[in-house]
Amino acid sequence: MQAVRATAFGAPSVLAVTEVPTPEPGPGRMTVDVTHAAVGLVDVFLRQGLYKDRPGLPQAPFVPGLEVAGTVRALGDGVSGFAVGERVVSMSAAGGTGGYASVYLTDPALVVSLDGYDIDSALAVSVLPNAAMAHAAFTRVAHLAKGESVLVHGALGGFSAAFPGIAKQLGAARVVGTVRAGKLEAAARTRLPYDRIVDSAEMTEALAGETFDVVVDPVGGDVRTRSLDLMGPGGRLLVGGNASGDWDHSLRSNDLWYRSITVSGFNSGAYLPSHPDAIRPGLEAARAALAAGLGGTEIEILPFSRAAEAHERMENRSLDGRIVLVPDAAA
């Protein structure tokens, strides 16, 4: 089968289209004929080798990709609830690899059907897996309550873009996003259900007088520190990434107790395997949010042969939504 392989850790140029063996599903597993594979920032970090020394994460060479849409190809022994040919979306399987390929091996527990729903597959793979994670993060970690307010940093990014729709679905009264100044024009065009989007560099002044119950921060660095000024007592800061690249950033613990603020980390790769009961409700809530029109985002589709370009653009932030890869024959 066709696949994009990271032949080594390094620059985007290490990505190359190649032929690899087609996986067959063993007991309790299933395969999907991939029509669309989402490109995420974590794919970039894995390809760079940022996590190469962490147990359980891939070693080169490997096929990147965590999220795919397509049709059910085959079911292993003991798998029920799906039919061959059914349209589906799959979240990341263990190890977070294998998505940039024409056939994907996955766990049925991470798969949700699109049959009977008027949801485009490119949109589904771009939003649905992250929205399922957002549902778990809001309901299990940040404990978002109806009527509360939410602030989302990096508002147009692949991970962040899933949060406003789920927040609205859960009854949030107000959802505000922040972006870098260069993204304000794209923010003005977005179909995501934000009540307002502001420049992150000016957020303290732009949002003066407002406080938020939950702040979602996959950006980090100075944005994380300044978020504390926009949170009231009982506020929850949900740390979900480090797009800023500031790996030495820290918060002062004395600021937390004095302000009565809670900080929680959320890494779906760590959380969901140990809390599998959160996956199915998350997938179903995410599907409902998309069906209700709460998940629109800009999408660009590229063939597998342009995967290196997709990674380059992820690194230099020259996109305003998601990039989705498709097998070259389908491009």
Image (tube, rainbow, N blue to C red):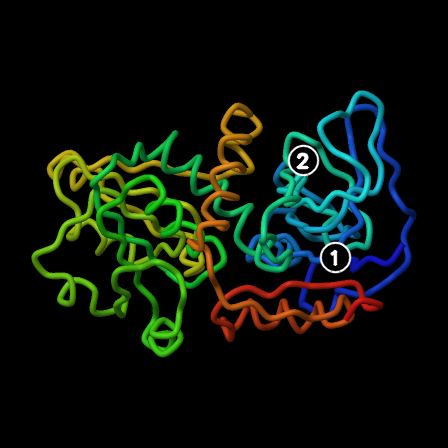
Quarter of the image with the N terminus in it? bottom right
Sequence-earlier tag: 2 or 1:
1
Q: CA distance from mark 2 to mark 1?
A: 21 Å
* Residue 330 in picture, x, y percent from top left: 80, 67
SS for dot 2: loop
Task: Say whether residue 7 is visible.
Answer: no
Q: Dot 1 lies on which element?
A: strand
Q: Residues within 10 Å of mark 1 (few under 14, many from 20)?
A: many
Density class for disc 2 (Cα within 10 Å; few <14, some 14-19, many ≥20) is some
Q: Position of residue 58 (x, y in %)?
A: 70, 44
Q: Is residue 230 above or below residue 308?
A: above
Q: Which part of the image, by quadrant, shows the C terminus?
A: bottom right
Question: Which amino acid, mark 1?
Answer: Thr
Of residue 278 and residue 268, the one placed in the foreground of this image is 278
User: Residue 33 location in percent, x, y?
Assistant: 80, 49
Q: Are marks 2 and 1 in contact (CB under 8 Å)?
A: no
Q: Quick check: 165 left or right of 302? A: left
Q: Residue furthest left?
A: 209
**Which residue is most to the top?**
78
Q: Position of residue 235 (x, y in %)?
A: 20, 39
Picture quadrant where residue 113 is located: top right
Q: Amino acid at mark 2?
A: Ala
Q: Nearer the viewer, mark 2 or mark 1?
A: 1
Closest to the observer, 320 or 288: 288
Query: Mark 1 highlights which residue?
Result: 35
Q: Residue at x 16, y 67 (%)?
A: 206
Q: Is residue 275 visible?
A: yes
**Disc number for residue 94:** 2
134 relative position to 325: left or right: left
- From this viewpoint, which residue is outermost toward the front? 116
